[in-house]
Amino acid sequence: MSDLMYISKGPHRFVISKLFGKILIWLLIIIITLLLISYIYGIWTIELVYSVGHNSQKYGTFIMKARLPAFLSKYEKKKSLTDLMKEFPKVNVTDVTQIAKPTCKDLIRWNKTAIVLALIYQQNMPFARIPDAQYPILTADCAKFIKEKQYIIEPITKEEEEFPIAFSILIYKDIEQFERLLRIIYRPQNYYCVHVDIKASQSVHDGARSLARCFENVFIATKLVNVLWGSYSVLEAELICMNDLWKYKQWKYFINLTGLEFPLQTNLDIVKILKIFHGANNIEGTVLRMNKDRVSYIHNMTHSTTISKGPPPVPVTLTKGSVHITASRAFVDYVLHDDRALKFKKWVKDTGIPDETFFSSLNHSPQLEVPGAYRGIPESDPNTYPLLTRFKNWGSKPFDYPCYGLRVRRICTFGVADLKLLSERREMFANKFQLNFQPMTYECMEELIHNRTRDEQRGILGFDSTLYDSFDFIHNHV
């Protein structure tokens, strides 16, 4: 009777007990393995939340709340939030409807009380959104729309006028966020190709076309594709815009964006940075962190097969990077027209996540005479070869930073408590922002860039070239 695992007396009792014990052991092994995986990838999390209930004494009280690891939850967060959030004060609010909206100035300066109040304010105060379907109506009178939204319709400086930039913008939702991004980066001398995912809603397509119709230098891509992450379609959409932009002969550099990004620098500062590049590209590349299976086996769309893939048809250095690039006009010319690039493009079509291989590998293959390609060791690093094109907080080295917003699939969606960090970054753009998540974050970034643009125009804000001109990729390229 001492054996608690038997279900009946007899010779089978020990066998059943032993089998049940083995099952328990394997369950423990599986649980421990999953916990170790979540710990290694930094996805076991502590989230700071505040309770706003019917009891006025609970208003604004902050508590620590544990979330499930990422394999059980849609959202991933950084475990370091536990310590980061301890420095925030408790704020007692008896009536949330009476909270004054905190200023962006206080939020950017890391006023902790203001940050707490901003979180409560955003949770309880409605933020008006403009439906996608409203934009064809709003843009019916383009001149009125441009004036009301305060677009910059004349070059601010001669230096900007003489250095046009070409942008591609890939979108699939949220015309309001796209329009606000376009508004902050728009200059009449630049060029903007907008690729709308073919599976986006009709209201998104109509909204994007109505916006593009109001500007001579903004247009919808000539071909729209069904963009699926991990497949060739991501790279294809970028190449379509590159090709569409090529006919405009004036632009000097190409930068690709999505609708979920925002500039960290003014247009003038971006021009100054690109002039320092002097023909160099800024494209991430790594061999050490590369997933070799992506290029070793044939992939069917987003799925790997067991069929081995032969070597590239050209002597390219295979690296892993980001689809987000800053590239010289000469690099774009090579990508679109050089036979070696065209052969390599055909080869990467059935690899895994080809957009992270194509641009990166070309930029780290000086033996192919790729304009602007880096001659040094193909290993991007914040200190030696930083990705100045884009600031992304992945939560893992070498791109590991505190995230006070929300991690989704490892990447940080920025919140109001991230504004100070964003204001201090030297990259040109940041990824990512969501208008539906802590909308004051986007508002304050708009105010920050607007104020810096104004101060540049007044001559009270300068540019520190020493933040950029010492990197090896600028001085050691084809």
Image (tube, rainbow, N blue to C red):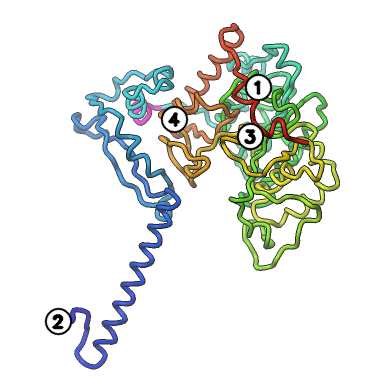
* Dot placed on the residue nearer the N-terminal end, 3 or 1: 1
Three-letter code for the amino acid on which mark 3 is drawn: Leu
Quadrant including the C terminus: top right
Quadrant including the N terminus: bottom left
Closer to the camera, 285 or 187?
Answer: 285
First to last magenta residue range: 121-126
Residue for point 50% across, 42% down: 394
User: Which numbered disc covers residue 186?
Assistant: 1
In this view of the protein, can residue 168 be seen by the observer? no
State the separation of the CA atoms marked 4 and 2.
59 Å
Residue of label 3? 257
* Dot placed on the residue nearer the N-terminal end, 1 or 4: 1
**Residue 280 sits above or below residue 235 on the image:** above
Image x and y of residue 297, in percent: 67, 62
State the separation of the CA atoms marked 1 and 4.
25 Å
Closer to the camera, 17 or 475?
Answer: 475
State the separation of the CA atoms marked 3 and 1.
13 Å
Three-letter code for the amino acid on which mark 4 is drawn: Asp
Residue of label 2? 2
State the separation of the CA atoms marked 4 and 3.
21 Å
* Dot placed on the residue nearer the N-terminal end, 2 or 3: 2
Image x and y of residue 314, in percent: 81, 53
Residue of label 4? 418
* Dot placed on the residue nearer the N-terminal end, 4 or 2: 2
State the separation of the CA atoms marked 2 and 3.
68 Å
In this view of the protein, can residue 68 be seen by the observer? yes
Residue for point 37% across, 41% down: 80
Location of residue 369 by image quarter: top right
Within 10 Å of the Cα at label 2, are there few (<14), some (14-19), or many (20+) other Cα atoms? few
Location of residue 248 by image quarter: top right
